[in-house]
């Protein structure tokens, strides 16, 4: 179920990666299901400092916020980091709503044509460290 949703949001099949990613130690994975369709999921994992959320993919801002709140609860009292795409204004608004602090900006580069992605569903990328 998560595999298909992730492929639609990420643009490529990464079945093995996601299977390992959602079950890594010191991590939590959350999904949002509505009759019985998956409408979003998020993973939060332990980082060197605090916790990092990614991916956070959701059909709409309300679902993204519910998943975000689950992640915050998982990391209660710890620093939480979320890498967003500024192209999704709802991701920006979500971080502002929870007093997120802007730390730095990165550019995205592609070899060839950029994939067509549902940016409106991407509230947090998996990891800058992984590319």
Image: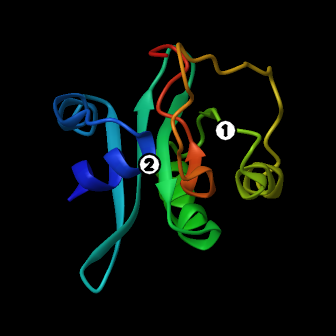
How would you rate the neighbour count of disc 1 (Cα within 10 Å): few for under 14, some for 14-19, many for 20 or more?
A: many
Query: Which percent across, then down, holds residue 105?
Result: 79, 21
Q: Nearer the viewer, residue 87 or 79?
A: 87
Could you say where residue 121 lies in the image, as x and y percent from the top left? 55, 56
Camera-nearest label, 1 or 2:
2
Mark carried by residue 9: 2
Which residue bears the numbered disc 1? 84
Q: Is residue 94 above or below residue 45?
A: below
Check disc 2 and report its element: helix, strand or loop.
Answer: helix
Q: Nearer the viewer, residue 120 or 39?
A: 120
Say few, some or many: other residues with alpha carbon within 10 Å of mark 2 (under 14 / 14 to 19 / 20 or more). many
Disc 1 and disc 2: Cα gap in Å?
A: 14 Å
Element class at badge 1: loop
The answer to whether residue 5 shows anywhere in this view is yes
Q: Residue at x 50, y 42 (%)?
A: 75
Q: Is residue 38 left or right of residue 71?
A: left
Residue sitting at x 25%, y 28%: 25
């Amino acid at each position: 179920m998560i595999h298909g949703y992730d492929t639609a949001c990420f643009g490529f099949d990464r079945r093995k990666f996601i299977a390992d990613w959602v079950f890594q130690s010191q991590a939590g994975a959350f999904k949002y299901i509505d009759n019985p369709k998956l409408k979003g999921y998020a993973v939060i994992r332990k980082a060197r400092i605090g916790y990092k959320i990614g991916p956070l993919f959701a059909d709409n801002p309300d679902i993204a916020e519910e998943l975000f709140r689950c992640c915050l609860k998982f990391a209660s009292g710890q620093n939480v980091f979320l890498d967003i795409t500024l192209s999704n204004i709802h991701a920006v608004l979500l971080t502002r709503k929870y007093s997120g602090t802007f730390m730095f900006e990165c550019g995205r580069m592609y070899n060839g044509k950029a994939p067509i992605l549902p940016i409106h569903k991407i509230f947090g990328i998996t990891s800058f460290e992984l590319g």
